[in-house]
Image (spheres, rainbow, N blue to C red):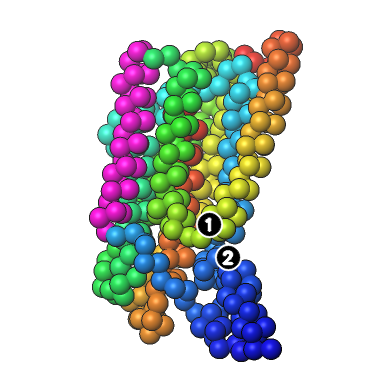
Amino acid sequence: MSTTLSQLDKIKTGAWSGGRSPFNLEYGKIMMWSFLVSDAFTFSAFLIYYGAQRFAHVAWPDPDKVFQSIPFIADSGYPLVFVGIMTFILIMSSVTMVLAVEAGHRGAKKEVINWMILTVIGGLMFLGCQALEWTHLHHAGFWYGSIPTQEGVSPEIVLAPFFTNGISEVSALQFANLFFTITGFHGLHVTIGVILNIIILSQTINGTFERKGSYLMVEKVGLYWHFVDLVWVFVFTFFYLV
Amino acid sequence: MATHQENHGMTGAPATHEEGMSVGKIWKVFFYLLALTALEFFIALALVHQGHVEKGLAVNIVYIALTLMKAYYIVAYFMHLKFETFSFINIVSIVFVLIIYMIVLMLIEGNYLLTEYNRYPWWPSV
């Protein structure tokens, strides 16, 4: 009898025998991952649709001609420079977030606060840049459902500066709608991320995690923040580079 | 009988990840990401814009490969997925087969539309 019992005990220590998380992960982190996977599907659907539309149309706006300004410095002639700065800001704020998580592992409250402040600043800077980018495009005449037009001038001439091979009103409209939808949805994620980061920062300052004895919440919000950076990597490639 | 299990409760923090990221490793990954982005900019600004390389499928494949490498570094190291259990890594990553499936479907659809748009010149393309 005693041998049977000890055998049962032995079986029950396996990862999938129940009684503990088989992933050796905390519940909230698993839930954050499931949310991020589903969110990744949303963004993938957006970007795949963009790619398919672009592939299907004979002419498509040339991103190097649409995005070529650096706000306050140059109005045209510098494609990729401004978006390069935005990419750098977001990657940088991702790094400060990992550093905050790392400091949390050591329980170093002061370092967590410093890195979280830098992460929040990075997020706000990115949002500011995106606002400038949107403003610039809006002034050029692009918006949801609208493309540059001019009274008495044929669309072919008005749209010519944005195209390299062929000109298409339909493509310009698709491009405008998809650009504002996808970067808008990403911007919404960044905004939520900044709000979450601010909440985490104030909780750290208040000593909530210190009392709990674990900075797990910083890790969970960190996962979300890295995901936002991850999405931007893809948006950057498919909207600006390709 | 159940004495073995009392330390394996589902609540509370799991065993800490000893193999996590050190500060040095974080900066190393950051420089990989920076280098990959710089490479993308080099290809775009120094090769494509100067006319050394034609914009097209070949360059796009290079861009996408670099993007996927960046994505790997972010997910594996920053999001710590590389250090999770084997089963969890699979659960999170295998579903993306569906994304590949959707890309294939949408490319087939896009290709069909492209031939149709070319066939009917009345489609507003001025």
Taking the magenta stretch, the answer to whether it contains residue B45 is yes
Q: Which percent across, then down, holds residue A46? A: 61, 40
Magenta extent: B23-52
Crowd band around label 1 with a 10 angstrom C-alpha radius: few (<14), some (14–19), many (20+): few
- Quadrant for the N terminus of chain A, please: bottom right
Q: Which percent across, then down, holds residue B20? A: 36, 62
Predominant secondary structure, magenta span: helix
Q: Tell me the residue that label 2 is attached to.
A: A31
Residue in the picture at 43% in, 61% down: A222
Question: Disc 2 residue type?
Answer: Met
Identify whether B17 is placed above or below B101: below
Identify whether A15 is placed above or below A190: below
Circle 1 sits in a helix, a strand or a loop, which is it? helix
Residue in the picture at 66% in, 42% down: B98
On the rendered structure, is A31 left or right of B124?
left
Q: Which percent across, then down, holds residue A109? A: 29, 75
Q: Tell me the residue that label 1 is attached to.
A: B86
Does residue A36 appear in the picture of this structure?
no
Front position in the image: A17 or A175: A17
Residue in the picture at 27% in, 34% down: A73
Circle 2 sits in a helix, a strand or a loop, which is it? helix
The residues bearing labels 1 and 2 have C-alpha atoms spaced at a distance of 17 Å
Front position in the image: A121 or A17: A17
Front position in the image: A110 or A1: A1
Q: Which percent across, then down, holds residue A91? A: 36, 48
For marks 1 and 2, give the one nearer the viewer.
Answer: 1
